[in-house]
Amino acid sequence: MKLRAWLLRFKGLFSKEERERELAAELESHLQMHIDDNIRAGMSPQEARRVAVMKLGGVDQTKEAYRDRAGIPFLESGVQDLRFTLRQLRKNPAFTVTATAMVALGLGASVAIFAFVDAALIKPLPYQNPSRLLYVTETAPDIPRGVLSYPDYLDWKKFNQVFESLEVYNERGYVISTPAGTEMIDGARVSAGFFRTLGVNPLLGRDFQAGEDLVEAPRTLILSYDSWQKRFGGKQEIIGQPISIDETPFTIIGVLPQHFHFAPVENAEFWTPVIPAGGCLIRRSCHSLHGVARLKDGVSEQAALADVTRIAKDLEAQYPDSNRNQGATVAPLSEIIVGDVKPILLLLLSGAALLLLIACINVASLLLVRSETRRRELAVRRALGATRARLIRQFVIEGLVIVVIGSVVGLVSSHWAMQILSGLIPTDMMASMPYLNDLGLNSRVLIFAIALAGFAAALFSLTPAFRLSSLEVRDGMAEGGRGSAGKVWTRIGSKLVVLELTTAMVLLAGAGLLGKSFYRLLQVDAGFETKHLITMRVRPPLPAYGEDEQAVALGRKVVAEIKSLPGVTSVALADTLPLTFNGNTDWIRFVGHAYNGEHNEVLQRGITSDYFATLQAKLLRGRTFTDAEDLTKPRVVVVNQTLAKKFFPGEDPVGQRFADTDLNPKSIKEIIGIVDDIREGPLDAEIWPAYYYAFNQSPDVGYSVVVRTSQAGESLVPTVADAIRRIDSRINISGQTTMTARVNNAQTVYLRRSSTWLVGGFAVVALLLGVVGLYGVIAYSVSQRTREIGVRIALGAQRGTVYRLIIREAGVLALAGIVLGTGCAILAASLMRKLLFGTPPWDLTTLVCVAAVLGASALLASFLPARRAASVDPISALRAE
Amino acid sequence: MSNKTEIWQGTLALMILKTLDTLGPLHGYGIARRIEQISEDRLSPNYGTLYPSLLKLEQEGWIAAEWGVSENNRKAKFYKLTRSGRKQLESETKEWNQTTAIVARFFEPVED
């Protein structure tokens, strides 16, 4: 019944006129009947009417009471307020556009960044109960996060008491034959329970079964969804089909779901079991596997760490040769996958939040100024009987309208911003961040947006409403009452402006520090000339070039063929390119040095004779090897300076020899030269000791080609690839690019560059908004003081004095903002120290520069109102009153 | 003041329902006169206050309105009790009787 009544009342909102007419008719008939009765009782017609009307109690009051009941008065007057607000906003397009644009900007930026945070940090892993998944692996001195050896893995799996399951994976390339020739395919090897541990079921077919990762089991393979679509046309009957990979028959047993991704081996198309058939996997000292474990219920990460550390200790005691100093480490899987981007995303989110704060403050102060100019209107309405609640509601509705329009625009633009931002991420980078595929305006992002909008709406409606409570009707009505209220506003306004300038200072300093870190990173000496270098990865078909002699011969042919191309000055081969990673290590022992089984872990790189010349790396001592030093000659190596300094302090390394830990005669190598450090890992990583051996003495099946060109080399890239294919069309070529592009797209460089640009962008907008805010306050203050200034000038004040007066007012605010901002900036920068590179959080040059920029902008902003003040004509200023 | 009005609105609604129950379909003026009559002019409100109450009862679905012609050939809006209105009247009557009986006991002379 109640609901029915409310529905009718709601309906009443819309059928107003008809209802009014009916009520009028009803009251008219009521009066007539009463008049008839009165006349019958003997009254004169006039008297009869007068009495009837009196008895009815006033037609208008009745109508008013009736109206209240017929509709919902609160809503109805709300609609009135809304109309009034819209009319007001239409009348002030400049204010409306500015206010909504600021809300849209702040909200849009925050929501777009939050969407990235959501995709990367809140729900990055599409697995069952991902918070219980750990990344588990071995450690060694200098290697905080190494990889597991297969025998160690089996022992960990067997002896641990904390994991529901422990599985391993590693990356693995496969070669398949296609009609177009051989093709190299990214793949991964996993232990049989890997997908079950993640909680992922194949879309089609079945998962690996226990025992399918044993040597005697038939070879099986699971396809990624993309691979299934691309290579097999998405056909259902693919399950059970044989396929030949690396010349070995496999059976396709399953297809992974479309939305499955596993960032560490994101490009993997083929998933096969890890089968310990020989090579690295059967040696306890050969580490190649990453572990993923699911914790048992109720077991903490610490307990898990303690347990695997215990196992590692036992193994160390049991196998001192291979496991000396091998420890254990665990980390949440999500940290491995999103660890690198997490601090940057949080930084960007804070930046966007500060921007939103500044935008909101600006709009709030705009609203305040408006409420000032509307003092008289409000006072009149109050005097005419509008309740305070009604006036406050007016402001609330105004704030809501601005926020709603701004939020809608902001949401739409955040959608665009997300598309643009994720479009700017290079494909390679995107592949390592597959969780970003889920980027979008999902329910969590929308809730975030609504929360922000709610905050803004509360701020906007409360600020003027708060002001209103201090507003006296008489003050508003009185012509001269303006002065004191103006002062109140200037006081609140200046506080807001200081807050804005502080925020702008924090953002500017943050951007400055990031920019400087980025600059420092690019200034890092790579140890070689990165310009005019082409690189690509070459993988010859195995059966034809499997023997060392064949591989060496092919390598020589590749070098000769490319070298004959016009524009090429030098060519070399390397098994691993510089600036890739600090991995691919060897464990060595120096002949003639005392040895206690310590872990001398150094990088090893196989290169051809022209490698250092091609890279333009500096040979410091001795010589590099010649092309003739091949399998038939004694083994020789060149070491980097770090190795020389670390292991031969005060000694000349040239002529010294080292070998594997058993001093196996076959493994003995002689040092023939020292090369200046080349950065093998990322630019911001430390330099490891490294040695370079002759490719011709231990050729690898796949390798990278490094080509020095006389000009910028992009155009030569396809020519080089064609030259290689001319030798043998079955050779697989991938990763064709220039070294410059590799540097720019390297994750550490890319993340720093993009965060610098984004935070820089936020900072510029924040500066603009802050300065506009300052301008607003000073301009308002000048307009309030026109008369005072007029009097001053009339009394003989110089224009310069007036300038100083106004600029000092602005200067105090700017200075307060800068001082507070510097403090906050140093605090904020200390929090993001991880992202800084070669720059302390209190970097003086940056802070001084930023303060100077802010100060200069503030000066500029106050100059305009100051000039207006100085040019006040005393006569007209006084007459205006 | 507002409390009094609320009580008045409540009892007024009950009076309207009872009037329509006794006299059948009737227009607003007739209802007002009837209330005056029954109360022997001791209740003589402004007739205007009746109309919001009538609207409320109509919205609740207890009475229904229809235009008709009065005994003096005047066009008038006639209200009549609906089925749910009758039920409402019954339950409210019961409640009213109980309430008055209880309150009355408080005012009975106390016997010690």
Image (spheres, coloured by chain):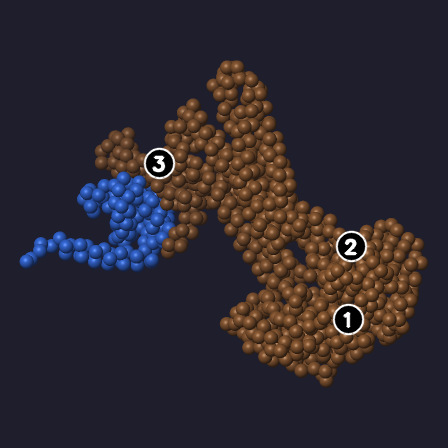
Chain colours: A brown, B blue
- Residue to which mark 3 is pinned: A60
Callout 2: SS: loop
Mark 1 or 2: in front is: 1
Callout 1: SS: loop
Residue A239 drawn above or below residue A606: below
Density class for disc 1 (Cα within 10 Å; few <14, some 14-19, many ≥20) is some
Callout 3: SS: helix
Mark 2 or 3: in front is: 2
**Image coordinates for residue A36, horizontal then vertical, percent:** 28, 37
- Given the current orientation, which residue lies at the most extreme bottom position? A216
Amino acid type at mark 2: Gly
Q: Which mark is residue A591?
A: 1
Indicate the chain on which mark 1 is placed: A
Mark 3 or 1: in front is: 1
Pick whichever of labels 1 and 2 is earlier in the sequence.
Answer: 2
Pick whichever of labels 2 and 3 is earlier in the sequence.
Answer: 3
Pick whichever of labels 3 and 1 is earlier in the sequence.
Answer: 3
- Residue to which mark 2 is pinned: A527
- How far is mark 3 from mark 1, CA to CA? 113 Å
Q: What residue is rendered at 90% in x and 60% in y?
A: A562
Indicate the chain on which mark 3 is placed: A
Q: What residue is rendered at 55% in x and 21% in y?
A: A801
Amino acid type at mark 1: Val
Q: Are marks 3 and 1 in contact (CB under 8 Å)?
A: no
Indicate the chain on which mark 2 is placed: A
- How far is mark 2 from mark 3, CA to CA? 93 Å
Q: Which of A280 and A47 is in front in this view?
A: A280
Q: Which of A436 and A318 is in front in this view?
A: A318
